[in-house]
Amino acid sequence: MSTEHLMGVYNRAPLEVDRGQGARLWAKDGTEYLDCVMGISTNALGHANPILVQAVKDQAEKLWHVSNIFKIPGQEALADALCEKSFADVVFFTNSGTEAVECAIKTARRYHFANGQPERIDIYGFDGSFHGRTYGAINAAANPSYTNGFGPPMEGFHQLVFGDHEALKAAIANPNTAAIIVEPVQGEGGCRAIPEVCLRGLREMCDEYGVLIIFDEVQCGMGRTGKLWAHEWGGMTPDIMAIAKALGGGFPIGACLATTRAATGMVVGVHGSTFGGNPLAMAVGGAAFAEISKPETLAHVNEIAGYLKQQLHGLKERFPDVIVEVRGKGLLMGMKLVPNNREFMGWARDEAHLLVAGGGDNLVRILPPLNFTLDEAREAIERLEKTCEFARGKISG
């Protein structure tokens, strides 16, 4: 097999994956790996989860696709479940997190248009954020790595320095501001969590000036932080939220959630999707959401996260020449490193058969499934320790 006919947009690891089960992957050569990448926080219930596999099988024998010009019962059922357990009143289903963010941006701008303020198009985001790869999404994050070469910046997008409260206040007071878009816990940007008091303050300021809040919980939502939604830690709610990844447990799905008020402008014909909300995605999404939203699942996430956090801080104490800082919330954890993070990922893979993900600020992310067992968590720490020992040897030369 060759990658010569694939666009070269990925820096792929030299690992050809054959199959997966639970928290483990097997390569073509039979090597077993402990997977703490999980498709970048996507396979939230592990690989080949039997509940999700059965949901796909059952639906595949009935109906794969039907146009959104007809009623799709699975959409209605999953939308009901999402709204019941969130701030939202309405949902638009997509095929990915990027599409969910795109819908969120359009929803925010259409809200002000419908309310007689079409000039309010400005969307403010934060440095280090990641919102996807569509044209609107890359402009919302404005990372030069993703925007360079794609023409002029899209009008109305601005970035703030993470933690600059005065600049944020000025942005919210701008009469042309439509919305603030933010990840409650940054994933790609380096596992940086917004302090809970800041989330509450953001809600108060936006309410004062009629600005909408968009939360991008594509990576940090769906139980990843130990609550169903990451913003719950702040005791407040957004107006619009993008989710995906874990919602399908590995199957392509996304959703834009909104209050009735925020979705005022989303009327017939202004948005749509051919495949969004298809019966297959709705079946597996419904099954995944039912499992992830169980109180016992969230309690388990907090238990395992507490153990891993304690152990990671222990590794930092033992390997200060390798680990600079431990960050994150719940099972969205990261270690800022002394050695290059991509090198560390390779050492973990090749020397300890542990898969971890990269991240901004020279971080590696640890993103196990939400049903990671305590024994698997212990094994992950043992493999990380082995990697740190190997890294120390490389550093000392």
Image (spheres, helix red, strand yellow):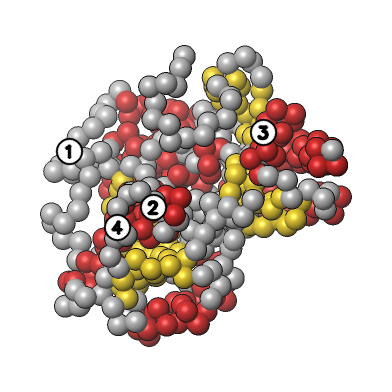
Q: Position of residue 336 (x, y in %)?
A: 69, 53
So how many labels did they put on this image?
Answer: 4
- Tell me the SS state at disc 4: loop
Q: CA distance from mark 3 to mark 2?
A: 28 Å
Q: Determine which residue is flagged by label 4.
A: 152
The reply to whether callout 2 and callout 4 are in contact (CB within 8 Å) is no
- Of discs 3 and 2, which sits in the foreground? 2
Decide which of 54, 369 is in the foreground and name it. 369
What mark, if any, has residue 147 been given in the picture?
Answer: 2
Q: Position of residue 373 (x, y in %)?
A: 68, 39
The reply to whether callout 1 and callout 3 are in contact (CB within 8 Å) is no
The reply to whether callout 3 and callout 2 are in contact (CB within 8 Å) is no
Q: CA distance from mark 1 to mark 3?
A: 44 Å
Q: CA distance from mark 1 to mark 4?
A: 35 Å
Which of marks 2 and 1 precedes in the sequence? 1
In this image, 341 relative to 216: left or right?
Answer: right
At label 4, the amino acid type is Pro
Q: Determine which residue is flagged by label 3.
A: 346
| Vertical position of residue 179 compared to residue 290: above or below | below
Q: Determine which residue is flagged by label 1.
A: 67
| Vertical position of residue 370 compared to residue 330: above or below | above
Tell me what residue is drawn at x 58 percent, y 49 percent: 359
In this image, 384 relative to 107: left or right?
Answer: right
How many other residues sit within 10 Å of disc 1, few (<14), some (14-19) or many (≥20)?
A: some
| Vertical position of residue 307 compared to residue 16: above or below | below
Tell me what residue is drawn at x 75 percent, y 29 percent: 351
Q: CA distance from mark 3 to mark 4?
A: 36 Å
- Asked where in the image residue 173 lies, by quadrant, the reply is bottom left
Q: CA distance from mark 2 to mark 4?
A: 9 Å
